[in-house]
Image: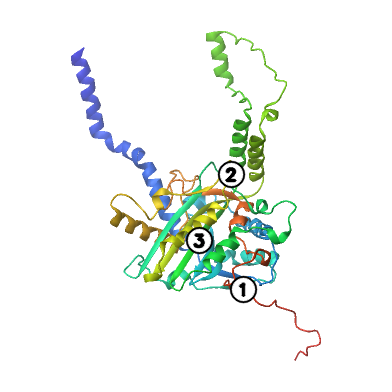
Amino acid sequence: MTKEFFLVISSLFEILENWWWVLLPFLLIRLFLYFWLWWKRTLFYKGTEQVLLEIKVPAEQVKTPQAMEQVLSGLHAIYGGPNTRETWIDGEINLWLSLEIVSIDGVPHFFIRSPKKYQNLVESSIYSQYPDAEIFEAEDYTKKVPQDIPNGDWDLWGRDMVLKKDDSYPIKTYKEFVPPREKEEKVVDPVANLLEGMGKLKKGEQMWIQFLIRPITADEIDLGEMGRKLVDKLVKRPEKPKLKPIVLEAGEILVKGPPKEVEEKRELIPPEMRLTPGEREIVEAIEKKISKSYFQTAIKVLYLGKGDAYFVPNASMPMGFFNSFLTLNLNRFKSIERTKTKVQVLKGPRVYARKRKIFWLYRLRLPPIFLPEAPVTSDYWNIKGGTSILNIEEMASLFHFPSRLVAPAPTMERIEAKKGEPPPELPIE
């Protein structure tokens, strides 16, 4: 028996020695697909022409963030899921937009970076809600500072932000900053407060906030289904029994016999009626969030300073901005630990590497290219879970042009006069 066993083992090793190369493609196929998609998608992204648009609004504009919500609803139309050929041969991806709030030497600016082919859509969406706005192509502000920051003259602080809880939980939105039965002049606007602080930065200081957004649908990430499952769990609804294949069910009957009849328990009070007011508020908020279009979002925050102008406590300004959208029983933003420019061990080299990386990624506006549709799920910037899902109402709360009714920052560049039509009696040559 022992001799026969060793003969079998020896034969297996002989087969493996002669035919190992047949197994190699099966072992390396996932690694090959990963690098193939990475290469093709990188080529596609680099070949996409981009344009940076600066938006200026009139000093007297009184639009609420709801106008920006309509703008974002229009921008959601850029979604176009690539088919199999476009994905694997052309490396096509769903393109991202970058919404940016920037302060340079104490002057706040609003930018939108878009693929060139969507420029008309972006401009028409903004003009539809802000007809008096001015939009023009701007030079990339990230190229006006040294490209090797941090260096002997410049330093920076930065991090990425994500939602702390499940994406189905909403943050506080602009509609909740309007106290009931109060006058419009008393509306609180975190964006206006942020711009007020940005306007106080000195010469040599800059603050950059970037929202990379990509429209998604239920075909990729079904936030609605995720939210409904979460609601069912919170409400404590009984799970629906999973249907078994007929063959499997017939086999169980032959082996175990017919299933015993279970007496159905009927509760007089449905689960929804047993919720506390706080639990009911959470359920309603989740259902409200999943009812609107949504974006996959990546958030980056940078504070830069030159020489003595660099003052780290100013970095608390954007953190206070994001904390304004906190609701303890729902959701809030948190920093991604691996992106913080502050560490406890090997501080020198690790902090330097993180600062260079976050500056480089912000400047290039690199999106997380490898998304759930890829065979190997991984983020382009090696941060798994570095994105959140925000609906258009939440995004409009984070990025909009503040109204004069909420005391906007006086240093913000605005259009002082509205454009008018030429008088009808003007002679035309």
**Disc marking residue 414:** 1
Direction right: furthest residue: 425
**Disc marking residue 160:** none
Kindly tell me whether residue 302 is visible in this rendering.
no
Task: Mark 1 or mark 2: name the one nearer the start of the chain.
Answer: 2
Q: Describe the element under mark 2 as helix, strand or loop.
A: loop
Task: Mark 1 or mark 3: name the one nearer the start of the chain.
Answer: 3
Q: Nearer the viewer, residue 407 or 154?
A: 407
- Camera-near label (3 vs 2) is 3
Q: How far apart are marks 3 and 2 (CA)?
A: 30 Å
Q: Residue 178 occupies which quadrant of the picture?
A: bottom right
Q: Distance between the residues labelled 1 and 3?
A: 19 Å
Task: Name the residue that disc number 3 marks.
Answer: 209
Q: In which quarter of the image is the C terminus?
A: bottom right
Q: Residue 364 occupies which quadrant of the picture?
A: bottom left
Q: Is residue 180 left or right of residue 42?
A: right
Q: In which quarter of the image is the N terminus?
A: top left
Task: Name the residue that disc number 2 marks.
Answer: 219
The amino acid beneath tag 2 is Asp
The amino acid beneath tag 3 is Ile
Kindly tell me whether residue 78 is visible in this rendering.
yes
